[in-house]
Image (spheres, rainbow, N blue to C red):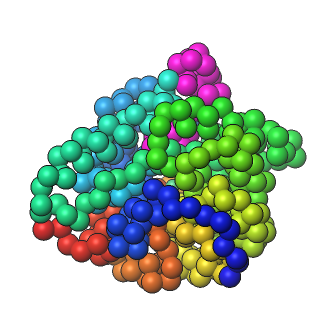
């Protein structure tokens, strides 16, 4: 176990405590947009709805709150300023859309909480936190490289920092509670995220989640030891873990991460289906339904995860199952 750095109690710690030691993250956001008929086969993927259907984004946030999510992840996973520019929008319009992604989640959280906090039978709900999603460079490339970590020879630390810097600044200005770096596939990008948080002197809690395809290492093949040694040196990262990896790999990954860090462990796997970056579709594979997630969630909590949710191809019913098993049945 790695020594603890000087840390202060954050809104994330408080939420985890309030949730009884393990808080519930929401589920597949793009997946739920698609369930409602959104067409997201686009270079912006789910972020296209920020332009075309912001009302649907808010509806999906509300569905995850209703299901018991303690943390909403915003619609900004694949929302980037260069991505918006490529659609003919101006920098100003792109920045407004990034802030809108935060505002939509905050509005959903506030209206849901106003409605439930006065209702005694809803004591299993907590006031949710809003985590601004910061998808990896590979997500922006839209070539599946968030699952390979292969960014080619021309991508160095400065390029990744340049890519992430302005979006990070704008999302922070939007006023989320947390920052969520998602599907980071290699050590270089994790380092870029950590250095940016330091350089920009960001004061809100953050998590970094890696994808993983082999259940052992980051997708790039770099060991989680290498990645976590670097992350542990920063007190700007409050939680570290895995998202959008198959659920059957998660328990052993939690055990591995526990050995490597004293930071909170977060896991929000996908359904087990595999994303084909070329044909842009999910390939059927060993796939897990809500019952299985219910049983996995207790094992993940008992193995040491403090934040548990779902990623692609999971839905509000998955989150309802996780929330019920971790927090008790809704009355
Ligand atoms: C998490 S993956 C399924 C997101 C979509 C991908 N970045 C693409 O645009 O193809
Ligand atoms: N927050 C994103 C992650 C995609 S891997 C989503 O749920 O759509
Ligand atoms: Zn995912």
Quarter location, residue 218 = bottom right
Question: Given the current orientation, which residue lies at the most extreme right position?
Answer: 153
Q: Nearer the viewer, residue 318 or 43?
A: 318
The reply to whether the magenta stretch includes residue 83 is: yes
Question: Does residue 17 show up?
Answer: yes
Q: Residue at x 62, y 74 (%)?
A: 262
Q: Residue at position x 59%, y 82% from top?
A: 255
Residue 106: x and y in percent read 36, 40
Can see residue 315?
no
Part of the protein shown in magenta: 74-95
Q: Is residue 242 left or right of residue 201?
A: left
Position of residue 323 measured from the top left corner of the image (x, y, whole percent): 31, 68
Identify whether 150 is placed above or below 58.
Answer: below
- Residue in view at x 42 percent, y 62 percent: 14
On screen, residue 91 above or below 201: above
Q: Quadrant of the N terminus?
A: bottom right
User: Measured along the vertical axis of the image, is residue 104 above or below residue 282?
Assistant: above
Question: Which one is nearer the viewer's eye here, 234 or 26?
Answer: 234
Give the quadrant of the C terminus.
Answer: bottom left
């Amino acid at each position: 176990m790695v020594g603890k750095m000087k840390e202060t109690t954050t809104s994330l710690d408080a939420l985890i405590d309030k949730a009884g030691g393990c808080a519930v993250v929401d589920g597949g956001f793009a997946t739920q947009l698609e369930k409602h008929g959104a067409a997201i086969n686009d270079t912006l993927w789910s972020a296209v709805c920020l332009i075309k259907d912001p009302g649907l984004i808010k509806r999906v946030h509300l569905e995850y709150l209703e299901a018991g999510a303690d943390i909403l992840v915003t619609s900004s996973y694949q929302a980037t300023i260069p991505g918006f520019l490529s659609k003919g929008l101006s920098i100003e319009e792109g920045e407004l859309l990034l802030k809108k992604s935060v505002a939509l989640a905050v509005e959903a959280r506030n209206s849901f909480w106003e409605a439930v906090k006065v209702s005694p039978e809803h004591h299993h709900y907590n006031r949710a936190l809003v985590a601004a999603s910061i998808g990896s460079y590979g997500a922006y490339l839209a070539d599946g490289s968030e699952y390979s970590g292969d960014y080619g020879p021309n991508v160095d630390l400065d390029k990744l920092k340049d890519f992430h810097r302005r979006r990070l600044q704008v999302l922070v200005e939007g006023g989320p509670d947390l920052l969520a770096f998602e599907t980071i596939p290699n050590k270089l990008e994790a380092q870029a995220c950590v250095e940016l948080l330091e350089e920009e002197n960001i004061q809100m809690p953050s998590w970094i989640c890696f994808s993983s395809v082999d259940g052992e290492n980051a997708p790039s093949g770099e060991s989680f030891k290498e990645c976590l040694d670097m992350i542990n040196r920063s007190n700007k990262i409050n939680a570290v873990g895995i998202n959008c990896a198959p659920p059957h790999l998660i328990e052993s990954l939690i055990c591995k991460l526990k050995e490597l860090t004293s930071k909170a462990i977060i896991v929000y796997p996908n359904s087990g289906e595999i994303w084909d970056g070329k044909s842009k579709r999910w390939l059927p594979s060993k796939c897990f339904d809500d019952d299985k997630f219910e049983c996995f969630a207790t094992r993940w909590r008992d193995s040491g995860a403090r934040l548990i949710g779902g990623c692609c191809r999971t839905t509000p019913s998955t989150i309802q199952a996780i929330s019920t098993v971790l927090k008790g049945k809704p009355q």
